[in-house]
Image (cartoon, rainbow, N blue to C red):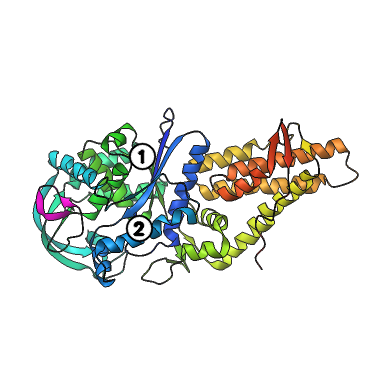
Amino acid sequence: MLNFWKKDKKFYITTSIAYVNSEPHIGYALELIQADVLARYYRQRGRDVFFQTGTDEHGSKIQRAAEVSKKSPQEFVDGLSEKFKGLKPLLDLSWNNFIRTTDKKNHWPVAQAVWLRILASGDLYKKKYSGYYCVGCEAFKTGRDIVDGKCITHKKDLEFIEEENWFFRLSKYTKEVESLIKKDKLKIVPETRKNEILALAREGFEDVSFSRSKKHLKWGIPVPDDDSQVMYVWADALTNYISGYGGIEKWEEHPSDVHMIGKDISRFHAALWPAMLISAKLSLPKNIFIHGFITSGGEKMSKSLGNIIDPYELIKKYGIDPVRYYLLREISSSGDGDFSYEKFEERYNGDLANGLGNFAARVLTLASKEGGLSGKSKKDIENFINLTNKNTENFKFDVALNEIWNLIHYGDGYLNLTKPWSKDLPEAKRKEVIYDLVFMLKTISELLVPFLPETAKKISEAIEIKEGEFIAKKIDNLFPRLQ
């Protein structure tokens, strides 16, 4: 059971904020679409939804990428942040707020206020430190995170850094965070990711460097009352969930219901972030959902490997809802999934063109000839509805879509069995069957609202309810077959 405040109409969902050292790719689009499904789902149920995303714009990677581009860091992040904002119309997303960590008015004061709360708890101390730093991860690496002198995630040589920094006493909160996760007071989904964090806790969290010297990094939020340091990029970035929501008071009224993040940043969200909040005497998020990676040919998509899929190009070629459908259906919600154009076109032709598109066209063509249709559906489809909703609420988006397609197949079977076009069928029976089919299609369109909003709207607009009757009209082919 997920941790939601059932009596509270508010529902606050966040994605991670995208690191803007390069342009957006389809992997981040997956997270945005998954979050959008939940946001639309709960809006559909009358909840007061606040959906937030944004861009993470400080740190060494940004500073270096800007230098390579011969731009100032601010010019560099301004251009890329606009690209990420452009994903909203591109993917038909419904976020309420887009936060930027370079926002000095809304973000910086909150990040610094959280810092001061942690300082007041006695959990920040300054010391000289030397260690191996991965610019890609924006983190110091130790132990099993290093293989042959390289970061296991980015597979690049680590940099040896020696400087005086502020440190956060993360080790102090190991047992408390571990207990919260074990008891599901901080719910981590799926269970495999929960177990990974608990395994880290058993080893013991280590204190983390919480600032960088301005000698090495100038691009960041200044540490309060210390002109020599800027805040560590994660100390800065994680507080976006508070700053973008309206500040500390708003967060305390209703902390995040769901953080949706990728598995590569799980330890920051499930270990560092709760410890920061406990230290700052602030409420914890209720659920952290951790998704996997989109792979290409079995390898993680990355800029360094050159196997990135550009969401702008993909949408231009296939359209918004086919892309949303593929990512939600083909990619396991909590695991890795492979992208290929061959699989994409198989899904498109099989599930969309021949499946939903064909069923909708057949039903609406039949119903458009009938005038008004009234009655009570004789087909019990409650089980399809309940399973779709249950799986959506449990972040199993691929399984939820499978249930909707089971209903489409069921409707197709009923259509083929009853043959409402047959002249041998009595008029009353024909109208009853067609009413059942329109009712099914209308239900399918309502179930599709969170997943394929554009398609759901087209179907819904083709079925008018007037004085208790269905009045249907034919529509253009929803998904023309790909040749």
Residue placed at 46% from the left, 65% from the top? 310
Which residue occupies the foreground of this view, 356 or 43? 43
Q: Is residue 223 magenta?
A: yes
Which residue occupies the foreground of this view, 5 or 465? 465
Q: Quadrant of the N terminus?
A: top left
The secondary structure type at the circle numbered 2 is helix
Type of amino acid at the residue the image marks with label 1: Ser
- Image coordinates of residue 178 in percent, x first then y, are 28, 42
Between the C-alphas of marks 1 and 2, the distance is 23 Å
Nearer the observer, disc 1 or disc 2? 2
* Residue 478 lies in quadrant: bottom right
Residue furthest to the right: 424
* Residue 12 lies in quadrant: top left
What residue range appears in magenta?
Answer: 221-230
443 relative position to 43: left or right: right
Position of 301 relative to 13 (above/below): below
Which residue occupies the foreground of this view, 71 or 21? 71
* Residue 188 lies in quadrant: top left
Type of amino acid at the residue the image marks with label 2: Ser
Residue placed at 67% from the left, 54% from the top? 357
Residue placed at 13% from the left, 52% from the top? 166
Q: Is residue 435 magenta?
A: no
* N-term-proximal mark, 1 vs 2: 2
Alpha-carbon neighbours of circle 2 within 10 Å: few (<14), some, or many (≥20)?
A: many
Circle 1 is placed at which residue position?
256
Position of 219 relative to 288 (above/below): below
- Image coordinates of residue 90 in percent, x first then y, are 49, 57
Circle 2 is placed at which residue position?
81
- Image coordinates of residue 123 in percent, x first then y, are 14, 43
**Label 1–label 2 contact, CB within 8 A:** no
